[in-house]
Image (cartoon, rainbow, N blue to C red):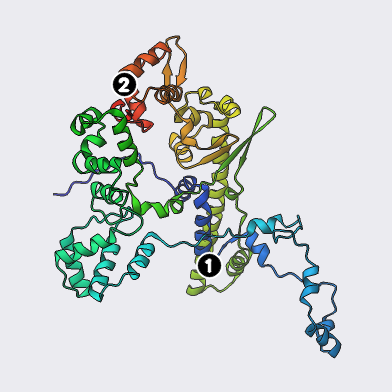
């Protein structure tokens, strides 16, 4: 038997406009331009005013007689044929560096694209070295398969048997394990040194064996990597000295030699390509002790609703006879117009929210932004800013997690200004960043032969008036990516 019941629920639902605003709010400046271009492509009712002004037809010679365009006289044509390159070059003011001396073309220079250095990739470099070898077709295909199987760090992580299967199925090459091993040894002689290794130990050994074998330090370094790599990585220096029967000075030279090696040879040629470009969303300048906040111009694009679409909608709406196709056309145009208006409103709301949030953060941390001293950073959590701007904590979080501010002393992620409070012995609340700064200074100034343990760091903080548990010190140390005392030890 079916039972009918009536239930009342309280649900929170977001409108499409709110969802669009939330998504736009968390988009950083570097990605906002791509998001706007995507919307412009999808919605023909939305226009970029800067592009629209550029596309408007302009009359280049308004005072010119149209009849003058028909210049077919012999005199004019002869002048066109007698073009002198020297006369043309004399009209240009050229500096010693080949650039124009005209200072009024700053905007044009800003629009020029930066030249990109063309360089071979890591895999192209290996392939070129393989091409120079006198190999038969089978060995060449094995070499290509091995190079293609290397990861970005330059290691061969795949088992040899799997590579043999790949050669059989993809290249129709039947190879033995010994043949693949022989070609791998050849590839391991390529530059950069250490490429083609199957683990860290083999990578370091390849690099060491390329050095001077007559050097006793190199011989000892090879012995350490071959037999005592675990003791080396865990910094059990006392055990190494006893096992190798050497003193601390000799061990230091061996360690320095090993530390010069590259654990990721494949990463050497692509370091610059992996650097991220940060575009700040805000700028804070100090104008004689008064902070001035500005929003990046890229966050305020000039968008408008297409006039032609608006006129089209008005025309359709006033049409007396409306058949099915006409109604569908009106509905389509209205949908695009509404979507364009919503997007423009969301962009404007995004600008207002960004400025409102950043202004509250700047005023809360006013002394810090004036001096740049982290000791002046006040304890601040998301709720503090949310209460000031009368917005939800999630809104502040979306702004803080993806936006950057440029100051006179660096560019920082907004999230880095938020910190928890720690109470000193005098009852004053300070930011935990101040404690982290003290920890960093203590560890930076410690004797590397006898690094400070967490218990000792806790005692130092207590002497300075910060009563913190040892586990809290360990948590802060790990947050700063500082290893434990034993791993910080140096000879």
Helix, strand or loop status at disc 2: loop
The spot of residue 186 in percent (x, y) is 26, 62
The answer to whether 357 is drawn above or below residue 275 in the figure is: above
Residue 132 in view: yes
The answer to which of 301 and 417 lies nearer the viewer is 417
The spot of residue 463 in percent (x, y) is 40, 11
Task: Say whether disc 2 or disc 1 marks the residue closer to the N-terminus.
Answer: 1
Q: Are marks 2 and 1 in contact (CB under 8 Å)?
A: no
Instruction: Kindly identify the residue that appears in the image at 21 percent across and 37 percent down.
Output: 230
Helix, strand or loop status at disc 1: helix
The answer to whether 42 is drawn above or below residue 16 in the figure is: below
- Number of residues whose C-alpha sits closer than 10 Å to that of mark 2, classed few (under 14), some (14–19) or many (20 or more): some
Q: How far apart are marks 2 and 1 (CA)?
A: 74 Å
**Quadrant of the rendered image containing residue 144:** bottom left
Tag on residue 330? 1
- Number of residues whose C-alpha sits closer than 10 Å to that of mark 1, classed few (under 14), some (14–19) or many (20 or more): some
Of tags 2 and 1, the one toward the viewer is 2
Image quadrant where one finds the C terminus: top left
The answer to which of 265 and 383 lies nearer the viewer is 265
**Quadrant of the rendered image containing residue 303:** bottom right
Residue 71 in view: no
The spot of residue 427 in percent (x, y) is 45, 11
Q: Name the residue under label 2.
A: 453
Tag on residue 251? none
The answer to whether 115 is drawn above or below residue 63 in the figure is: above
Instruction: Kindly identify the residue that appears in the image at 84 percent across and 82 percent down.
Output: 68
Instruction: Kindly identify the residue that appears in the image at 36 percent across and 42 percent down.
Output: 260
The spot of residue 398 in percent (x, y) is 45, 40
The answer to which of 104 and 452 lies nearer the viewer is 452
**Quadrant of the rendered image containing residue 311:** bottom right
């Amino acid at each position: 038997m079916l039972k009918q019941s009536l239930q009342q629920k309280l649900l929170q639902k977001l409108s499409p406009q709110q969802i669009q605003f939330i998504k736009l709010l968390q988009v950083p400046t570097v990605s906002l331009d791509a998001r706007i271009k995507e919307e412009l492509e999808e919605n023909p009712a939305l226009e970029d005013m800067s592009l629209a002004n550029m596309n408007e037809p302009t009359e280049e010679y308004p005072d010119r007689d149209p009849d003058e365009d028909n210049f077919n006289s012999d005199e004019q044509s002869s002048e066109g044929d007698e073009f002198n390159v020297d006369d043309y070059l004399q009209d240009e003011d050229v500096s010693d560096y080949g650039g124009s001396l005209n200072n009024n073309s700053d905007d044009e220079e800003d629009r020029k694209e930066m030249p990109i250095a063309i360089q071979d990739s890591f895999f192209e470099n290996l392939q070129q070295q393989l091409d120079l070898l006198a190999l038969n077709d089978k060995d060449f295909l094995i070499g290509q398969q091995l190079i293609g199987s290397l990861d970005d760090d330059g290691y061969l992580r795949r088992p040899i048997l799997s590579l043999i299967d790949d050669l059989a199925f993809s290249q129709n090459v039947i190879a033995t394990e010994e043949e693949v091993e022989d070609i791998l040894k050849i590839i391991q002689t390529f530059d950069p040194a250490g490429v083609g290794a199957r683990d860290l130990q083999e990578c370091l050994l390849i690099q060491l064996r390329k050095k001077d074998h007559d050097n006793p330090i190199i011989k000892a370094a090879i012995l350490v990597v071959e037999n005592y790599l675990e003791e080396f990585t865990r910094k059990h220096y006392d055990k190494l000295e006893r096992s190798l029967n050497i003193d601390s000075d000799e061990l230091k030279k061996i360690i320095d030699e090993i530390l010069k090696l590259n654990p990721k040879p494949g990463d050497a040629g692509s370091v610059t390509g992996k650097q991220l470009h940060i575009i700040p969303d805000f700028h804070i300048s100090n104008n004689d002790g008064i902070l001035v906040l500005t929003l990046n111009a890229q966050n305020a694009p000039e968008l408008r609703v297409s006039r032609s679409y608006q006129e089209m909608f008005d025309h359709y709406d006033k049409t007396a006879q409306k058949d099915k196709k006409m109604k569908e056309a009106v509905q389509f145009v209205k949908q695009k117009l509404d979507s364009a208006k919503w997007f423009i409103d969301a962009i404007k709301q995004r600008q207002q929210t960004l400025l409102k949030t950043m202004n509250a953060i700047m005023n809360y941390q006013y002394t810090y932004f004036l001096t740049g001293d982290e000791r002046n950073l006040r304890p601040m959590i998301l709720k503090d800013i949310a209460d000031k701007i009368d917005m939800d904590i999630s809104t502040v979080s979306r702004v803080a997690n993806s936006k950057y501010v440029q100051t006179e002393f660096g560019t920082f992620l907004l999230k880095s200004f938020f910190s928890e409070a720690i109470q000193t012995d005098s009852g004053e609340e300070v930011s935990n960043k101040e404690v982290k700064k003290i920890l960093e200074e203590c560890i930076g100034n410690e004797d590397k032969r006898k690094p400070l343990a967490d218990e000792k760091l806790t005692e130092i903080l207590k002497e300075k008036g910060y009563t913190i548990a040892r586990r809290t010190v360990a948590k802060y140390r790990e947050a700063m990516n500082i290893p434990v005392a034993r791993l910080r030890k140096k000879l």
